Amino acid sequence: MNVPNKITVSRICLIPLFMIIMLVPFDWSGDVIGPNGLTISHLLGAIIFIVASATDWIDGHYARKYNLVTNLGKFLDPLADKLLVSAALIVLIEVPEPYRVASWMVIIIISREFAVTGLRLILAGTGEVVAANMLGKIKTWTQIVAISAYLLHDVPLHWLPFSVADVAMWIAVIFTVFSGWDYFWKNRTVFANSK
């Protein structure tokens, strides 16, 4: 396993740590440290999530710079992104308002991830490995920004009934739906040719 793939695996390994920090009620986890009710557990969770998310850029940059792009990396990288984002979104369904993500948004995002993963498996059966395209990368980064804003208890926009995190999550959902449609549209021939 080359270095970029090891970095990707490290992103997957940070997910259980993130979930423990966010879900286990330690004595200190509920202590408030910020003006917006930011708790220690949410701050630590945000740091772990942001560090894990940063490895997505690091492994991709390293793989391209040193010509270490592999089929394993093309499979692991989007899988690691999906696992990290899905874990964070599911955790954010349980947190108290106003730092909770709407469950219907989480369902749309996770459903898209399952659908695109299924498409990748069908294409892999034909010998084609589909790497994440630019629209998919934008989708991932909009999700990361939105999740980070929720974890850090984003400041509400007092003149509007929502926060920057809410706006970011709406943008993430729009890119999620559009990028999913794009994957299926570009690979629609696989269904036409299936028997």
Image (cartoon, rainbow, N blue to C red):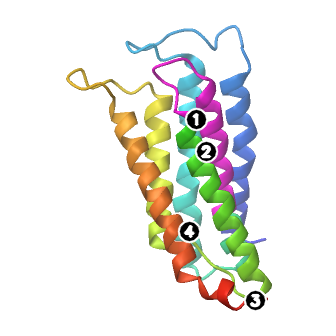
- Disc 2 + disc 4, Cβ < 8 Å: no
Q: CA distance from mark 2 to mark 4?
A: 28 Å
Number of the label disc, if any, that sits on residue 107: 2
Q: Can you identify the residue that label 1 sits on? A: 103
Q: CA distance from mark 2 to mark 1?
A: 6 Å
Q: CA distance from mark 2 to mark 3?
A: 30 Å
173 in magenta: no
Which numbered mark, 2 or 3, is in the foreground of this view? Answer: 2
**Mark positioned earlier in the residue sequence (2 or 4):** 4
Number of the label disc, if any, that sits on residue 173: none
Q: Can you identify the residue that label 4 sits on? A: 60
**Mark positioned earlier in the residue sequence (3 or 1):** 1
Name the residue rendered at 69%, 74% in the picture. 120
Farthest bottom residue in view? 193
- Disc 2 + disc 1, Cβ < 8 Å: yes
- Classify residue 23 as left or right of residue 105: right
Q: Position of residue 12 (x, y in %)?
A: 72, 51
Question: In the figure, residue 134 lies in which quadrant?
Answer: bottom left
Disc 1 residue crowd, few under 14, some 14–19, many 20+, Cα 10 Å: some
Name the residue rendered at 45%, 13% in the picture. 37
Number of the label disc, if any, that sits on residue 127: 3
Q: CA distance from mark 3 to mark 1?
A: 36 Å
Identity of the amino acid at label 2? Ile
The span picked out in magenta is 77-103
Of 102 and 52, the residue lying toward us? 102
